[in-house]
Amino acid sequence: AGEVVHFDRLPPCSGQCGGSKPSCLLDLDNNGTPDFCYRYPCCDCPSGCTSTLSGALYVPIVNGEEIGPNLNWENSVTWHHDAGGCSSGPGCDTPGIPAFIGLRFDDNKGTHYGWLRVVSGSFIDYAYQTDAGTAILAGDGLPTLADINGNGTVDVADLLAAIGSFGPCPSWP
């Protein structure tokens, strides 16, 4: 059975997309085949510029929303930037509050679904379902503060880890 795998940063560029704008090919599942192309401005944007993520995308997604085959997929999503930073696009309308973009990509096992979290136009992290054809919920795979041991489940083991971190009790006078 598949699992949700979460990454706290995008993978390194696996090449350039081509064209005049700086760009980066992204291979999310590290199988040697680029899944997305990110074109971005090369410098500050006092007079305005855009960045674009191309591939199979769906926006807007809210935390907990299902990402799967029944969505109306788009080929790209665009952010507009000006001297003040990100002015429009996913994650720009509510500065500091995360937005999710649904992702879809194929490998030799089939179609995979995932999400990309964006805050103020910056990519934060992503996750995808390793089981081809299986939907994922936006935010699945995100660690929680209560999951102290990082096993993906909040349970008695986390409580015991918290209690154990206090150390020995001081001796009575």
Image: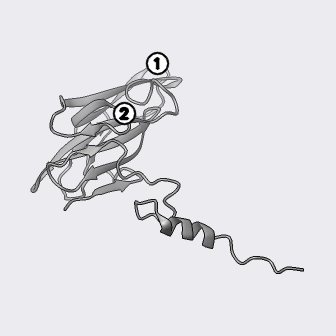
Residue 161 versus residue 49 in the image, above or below: below
* Amino acid marked by disc 1: Ser
Name, please, the residue furthest toward the right: 173
- How far across and how far down the image is residue 57, in percent? 24, 35
Tag 2: Cα neighbours inside 10 Å, few (<14), some, or many (≥20)? some
How far apart, in angstroms, are the residues tagged by discs 2 and 1? Answer: 31 Å
- Residue 157: give x, y in percent of width and height: 49, 69
Q: Which mark is residue 128?
A: none
Q: Quadrant of residue 90?
A: top left
- Sequence order check, earlier mark of 2 and 1: 1
In front of the other: label 2 or label 1? 2
In this view of the protein, can residue 8 be seen by the observer? Answer: yes
Asked which quadrant contains residue 66, the reply is: top left
Task: Tell me the SS state at disc 1.
Answer: loop
Q: Residue at x 53, y 23 (%)?
A: 84
Say which quarter of the image contains residue 78.
top left
Name the residue tied to disc 2.
62
Which residue does the image show at 39% across and 41% down from the upper left?
A: 117
Q: Amino acid at mark 2?
A: Val
Q: Position of residue 19 (x, y in %)?
A: 23, 34
On residue 47, the disc is: 1
